[in-house]
Image: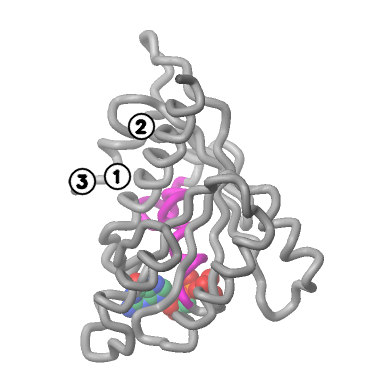
Amino acid sequence: SWSSSDSVISTDFAGEPAEPESPYRVVLLGASGVGKTAFASIFAGAADSMDSDDCELCGEELCEKEIEVDGEPAIITLVDMWDEQTDNEWTQEQYMQTADAYLLLYSITDRASFLRASELRITLRRFCPARHTPIILVGNKCDLVRRREVLTSEGCACAAVFDCKFIETSAAMQHNVWESFYGIVRQLRLRRDSREE
Ligand code: GDP
């Protein structure tokens, strides 16, 4: 767990920081309304402060910044371009083929979004079958306890079937959102380290 986002984001280049890995491209996927934009704005720092200078290469749909995970800096380029309504299949394929990792979101208050996450997972497997691309299944809006339609155990079981990690989050309460970014970086590093051996 983490105390405040300030303590985990390293934007201080003074001293001798370890050389960060090249940017990891992380794509947010999921049905509309599940909280992708909310995730992206927490990542960009917009939810903490009005000052988005924090983010080095910020646009509405793309944000690149350095964060510190387990004492080691990592650069993440977060892509929030997924638009189920307007994008054609070709565009969606592009997003799926160009990422290093995925956060696959659904809302625990919306069973249809959970089913959609399963479909997207299957589509992802089709596009990157050989690579062990890190994916975290994210059950967002866990603050909306009374409106829950998807049990934690269902999310967990789904992730086990799909061979990915699972986390429940609340972007509204800023609960576990950073944990999911850290989880992605840890998985990417595990993959990197096993390749180096
Ligand atoms: P997107 O379509 O996936 O980008 O979803 P948005 O980020 O735009 O979120 C859709 C709506 O859900 C907005 O009104 C958000 O404020 C709200 N929302 C997002 N995350 C949460 C959450 O964790 N809890 C609650 N209660 N509302 C959320």
Query: N-terminal of the two: label 2 or label 1?
Result: 1
Could you tell me if the residues under marks 3 and 1 are in contact, i.e. CB atoms within 8 Å? yes
Q: Could you classify mark 1 by the number of other residues whose Cα lies within 10 Å: few (under 14), some (14-19), or many (20 or more)?
A: some
Mark 3, secondary structure of its residue: loop
Bounds of the magenta span? 34-51
- Ligand 1 placement by image quarter: bottom left
- Residue at which label 1 appears: 5
Q: In the figure, is residue 32 to the left or right of 17?
A: right
Q: Position of residue 188 (x, y in %)?
A: 46, 38
Mark 3 CB within 8 Å of ligand 1:
no
- Residue at which label 3 appears: 2
CA separation in Å, label 2 and label 1: 10 Å
- Residue at which label 2 appears: 68
- Quick one: 103 or 124, which is closer to the camera? 124
Mark 2, secondary structure of its residue: strand
> Where 186 falls versus 18 (above or below)?
below
Amino acid on which disc 1 is placed:
Ser
Q: Please identify the quadrant where the C terminus is shown.
A: top left
Residue that lies at the very extreme toward the top in this rendered image: 16
Amino acid on which disc 2 is placed:
Glu
Q: Position of residue 147 (x, y in %)?
A: 28, 90
Q: Nearer the viewer, mark 3 or mark 1?
A: 3
**Is residue 37 rendered magenta in the image?**
yes
Tell me which residue sits at (46%, 35%) in the image. 191
**Is residue 54 rendered magenta in the image?**
no
Q: Could you classify mark 3 by the number of other residues whose Cα lies within 10 Å: few (under 14), some (14-19), or many (20 or more)?
A: few
